[in-house]
Image (spheres, helix red, strand yellow):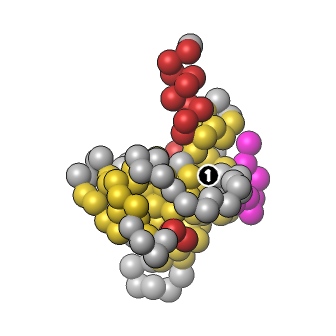
Amino acid sequence: MFSNGTLVEVSSDDDGFEGAWFAATIVKAVGKDKFLVQYQSLRTDDDSGFLREEFDTLRIRPGPPETLVVDRFSLFEEVDALYNDGWWVGVISKVLGGSKYLVYFRDTDEEIEFKHSDLRPHQDWIDGKWIMASQALMKLFYL
């Protein structure tokens, strides 16, 4: 499914990183349904290069497609926020002036301010397809 050099996002189950997705590149396959990836932003402890790690395909997804540029986000809209080098799912809890927003994160019960440029519409990778969050909810209710 993924070839060497493919841009992807990976999700770690390490403590404190659950639910976040990090940009990475496939380095090579290392067995059935397992790949070695190199992060695009996370560096090794000694800062000598970008961190490499093995992931099974359940924790790898293609990078999301470019969405239409969103002029603004709405109150209670689900978004991905770029925070600590990864994309974290949150909800717009307050629209501030100057293209800034407060985003609430359910998992950590935190509310953090973000610039518009550090947010993207949330999409889910379901059955091999990218689905906007609102469409994913509709699927749940109408299945």
Q: Is residue 128 above or below residue 111?
A: above
Q: In this rendering, is residue 128 above or below 9?
A: above
Q: Is residue 121 above or below residue 40?
A: above
Residue extending farthest front: 97
Quarter containing the C terminus: top right
Q: Is residue 2 magenta?
A: yes
Mark 1, residue position: 35
x and y, in percent, of residue 18 in the image: 36, 50
The residue lying toward the viewer, choosing from 140 and 3, is 140
Horizontal and vertical percent position of residue 140: 51, 21
Rendered location of residue 132, percent (x, y): 60, 40
Find the magenta span and give its range. Answer: 1-8
Q: Residue at x 39, y 79 (%)?
A: 45
Q: Is residue 83 visible?
A: no
Q: Position of residue 5 (x, y in %)?
A: 74, 63
Residue drawn 65% across the image and 52% down it = 64
User: For residue 15, which quarter of the picture?
Assistant: bottom left
* Outermost left residue: 109
Residue at (66%, 40%) from the top-left corner?
Answer: 130
**Residue 92 falls in image quadrant:** bottom left
Q: Residue at x 55, y 71 (%)?
A: 117
Q: Secondary structure at mark 1?
A: strand
Amino acid type indicated by mark 1? Phe
Q: Could you tell me which quadrant the N terminus lies in?
A: top right
Please tell me how crowded label 1 is: few (under 14), some (14-19), or many (20+) other residues with Cα within 10 Å: many
Count every numbered label the image shows and give the total.
1
Question: Left or right of 16: which side holds 1?
Answer: right
